[in-house]
Structures are given as structure tokens and as C-alpha cells.
Amino acid sequence: MLAPLPADRWQFDSAAHLLVRAGFGGKPQEIEKLHSQGLARAVDSLVKVVPDQYPNPMWINPEEQEQVRLRIEAAILPEEKQAIRQVVHQQFRRDMRDLIRWWIMRMVNTPVPLVEKMTLFWHGHFATSGQKVKPAYKMWLQNETFRQNALGNFGQLAKAISRDPAMMVWLDTNQSRKEHPNENFAREVMELFMLGEGHYTEQDVKEAARAFTGYRIDPVDQSFRFSPNQFDFTPKKFLGKTGPWNGDQVLNITLSQAQCARFISGKIWKFFAYDDPEPKLLDALTAVLLNARYELKPLLSRIFRSEEFYSDKARNSQVKSPVQFLVQTFRTLPVPVPDANVLQAFFRQMGQVPFFPPNVKGWEGGKNWINTATLTFRYKLSRQLVAGISPREIGLPKRPMPAIEAIAPRPMITRPLLVDQIASAQDRNEPSKLIDKLFVRVFQQAPQPDMTGKFNNLLSTREQPPTDDAIRDLIVLMMTTPNYQTC
């Protein structure tokens, strides 16, 4: 299992599959560049990287929460306190909308797409929501923690998350003390984060909870601090080992379980390849991660070079998440990213608002992304992004949509796609070649004859050479096929 893909099977479509799964797809020339490197160098170019430099949101201020707390304490009248809280809440909502767009823009523009793809993976794995966590600074800080550890060591990431202010608020670690240990984080460490159900006992949860007592958040700069007066120093028996364990030691004991490597490597495989990996494949993944002492790059390199990753079972088998759907569209087509309010509305109607997972388990994903309502919205959204329609048609407020072009005299109709960027005059003179060219860009694979017939039929009914509107309609038709919903 996990044998390298033979050199003669490294084809253009293989490179496209790698770029979509290990990132968010790319323009045809990006795919061709990856293909020309060969499998080993192509994988290295994605895996052997570090996070890029990117400007922080303008409102980042770790001292904001303490300043707000002092203002509320200083207020004398109850109505003053309530007024301050309302202003703070409104600012939080604006900051979170801005944070969503900031991350999407980073995914769209990043030169290291695997870093952002793994940041997205860890966000779903260590699911934490702005529904409870405030201010937005904490959610941004956690996002940065995921990014800085995205391709690093899983054990180090687990320890960093145990001290992460957003996680501490989300699972109440910051309230846990020796007299009353809170079990929320300890339970999820084993059930959702590191082992999976059935590999620990209720007593293990209780003992581990005592090890995470005394974890606090400094109110001045929102950093982690340890309060020894609130820590339980007495011996704890956890997963068969007894000692005066602290939180890091509990995590080390958990990491020493082969089940931990099996659980994490299996979940990573499902995210990048396909569900239900065969037992022997899971054995091989586990061995790679254990031998690498939980370093993630060796595991990811092995996955992306393996025959199984490029198998028919893996290709075009995943329903695109809303994030994948939008980011891939923005990376592959000259479509502008809308403003923060509109973008959040798009995600809400598709069922995945970044920074707001539904619960501690994160998003179910897979086929759960698609139902009658979300699929209908995806089709409407495709036309909005490419051809331009009234926002009211997709259930948004009556406001002009961001666009590069506006069509007078109807300002509510927009034309965000610059067609000349993807269809030259020469392309238009050869409709069949134009279809093939757009097929590669939209579907991220070589043209499939069984699909191109309907696209030829569309262009054959339009004036020749095809106009901008005809090409927009062609792209919309491609994006509203079932094939575009998968990757």
C-alpha cells in the first residue's frame, strides 16, 4: 500500500487532481507547470513550504477585550453598560465578517495553497465557533496557530491548541479549577481530536480534566497563562499510566497510543482522498505517521505520491465544500471576491460559514453539503458570479453587487467576468477548441467527449464567433452540471 504512482501515469489530469485536492485548483498554465515538474518535484513544491507573509486584518488588537471590560466596569448606569455591550457586539459582527473575507482572500491569493488547505482542515478538526468565542481577535489568533503548525508536528499543534484562547473559551478550560475540573476539553481531546470513540474510559476523561486545571487567559493581551493555585498536582491515572500529570503530559501519553496516529492519519486521508480507507491502507498511513513522530510533511508527501491517491476511487469523488466551491472559482476564473456582507451570505446559504462551525464536531461534509436548497443556490450563485443577476434572485438585500463591469441602464445587473482574459479572438474563431480550453479551466481536467456535446450544442445556437454573453452562458452551463460540484 502507498506505493508511488508510476511515472507513466503522472499525466496532466494527475497534476490537476493534486492541485485541486492539495489546494484549491489553478489556471491551466499552473496545472501544466506542476505536470512538467514530475510527480516528486510537484509534491515537494506543495509540501516543502512555509506559510507566506500576509497582512493582518486592520482591527487586530489583543488588548481590545480588556479595554472593553474596563469601560463596562466604569459605567455606572445599567443602560450605559447595555449600550456599550451593543456597540461591542456590533463591532464583533463586523470584525467576523471581515475576518471571513480576509481568510478567503488569503486562500485565493496564496502561493502556498496546501498551507491554507491544511489550515482549513484543522479548523474543521479542532472546530471552534465565534458563536461563543469573543472578540474576533481570538478567532484570528487560532487561525494563525493552525497556519503556523499546518504542516508541522501534530503533537506540537495539539499542545498549542490546548493553550489557545479561543479553544479555552469554546470548551471552558479557562474556567476549570482543581475543586471543579471541567471535562469538556479533556473529553474532546480523546473523542474528537486524538483517539476517537471507544478508545478511552469515562475515568480517563475525569483524570485528564484534572491535568488541564489552572489554564487561564491573560486579560491584558489575551495570551495563555498558567495559574498554579488552580492546578491539581495530585497523581492521576490516565490511559493506564499514573503520575502527577499536567496537560502536556496527558497529551504526550495520548500521542504514545498507536490509535492516535491511526485516527489522525485516517482523518487526513479522508479529507484529501476518499472516505473509508481500506484497513491495510490505514495500517500503512499509521506506520508513516508513527515513524515520522507525528511530523505531517512525510505523511502528506507519501499520500500525494501514492497510487491510491490518484485512483479512480479518489478522483472526482468528493463533493466540494462551500469554501472549496468559492475559492476554486475565484482562483480559476477572473471573478472578483464580493464584499464581506455578501460573501458571508453566500456561505450561510450553502451551509458553511468559516469560523462558525455548527458544533464541536465541525461540519459533516461529504454528501451533506448537497440538498435541494443548497444545490439550487449553487446554481443561482454560479450565474451571479459569472453572468450577473439581481441579488434579490438569490435572496440577498437589494444592493449592487461588486463587479468589474456594470451594464447600463440597469445597475443591479453586473458583469464580473472579464471574458477576454479566458477567451481570445482566435479562441472564438474555433468554437470546439474554445470549449476544450474552458473545460480545462472550469473542470480542472482534460476535456471529456461525453460532456462536451451539450456545450457544443449551446454554442451552435449562437451567433459566430461567440459573443461575451454566449461565453458567459457556456461557463454557467458548465458550473451548473453535477460534475462541477465534485472534485
Image: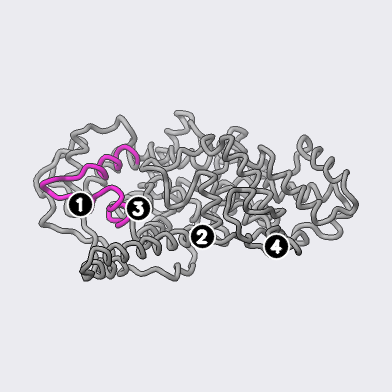
Q: Nearer the viewer, mark 1 or mark 3?
A: 1
Instruction: Please say whether residue 183 is one of the residues in the magenta stretch.
Output: yes
Q: Is residue 307 visible?
A: no
Q: Residue 198: image x %, image y %?
A: 30, 29
The amino acid type, in three-letter code, at marker 4 is Pro
Q: Nearer the viewer, mark 2 or mark 4?
A: 4
Sequence-earlier tag: 1 or 4: 1
CA distance for labels 1 and 4:
53 Å
Label 2 belongs to which residue? 101
Q: Nearer the viewer, mark 3 or mark 4?
A: 4
Answer few, some or many: residues within 10 Å of disc 2's Cα (few below 14, many 20 plus, some between 14 and 19): many
Label 3 belongs to which residue? 157
CA distance for labels 3 and 4:
49 Å
SS under mark 4: loop
Label 1 belongs to which residue? 175
- Image label count: 4
Instruction: Please say whether residue 3 is one of the residues in the magenta stretch.
Output: no
Q: Identify the residue shown where x is 51% and y is 48%.
A: 348
> What's the magenta bit mostly, secondary-structure-wise?
helix
The amino acid type, in three-letter code, at marker 3 is Leu
CA distance for labels 2 and 1:
32 Å
Answer few, some or many: residues within 10 Å of disc 4's Cα (few below 14, many 20 plus, some between 14 and 19): few
Sequence-earlier tag: 2 or 4: 2
Q: Which mark is residue 212?
A: none
Label 4 belongs to which residue? 411
The amino acid type, in three-letter code, at marker 2 is Arg
SS under mark 3: helix
Q: Which residues are magenta?
A: 163-192
Q: Identify the residue shown where x is 28% and y is 47%.
A: 171
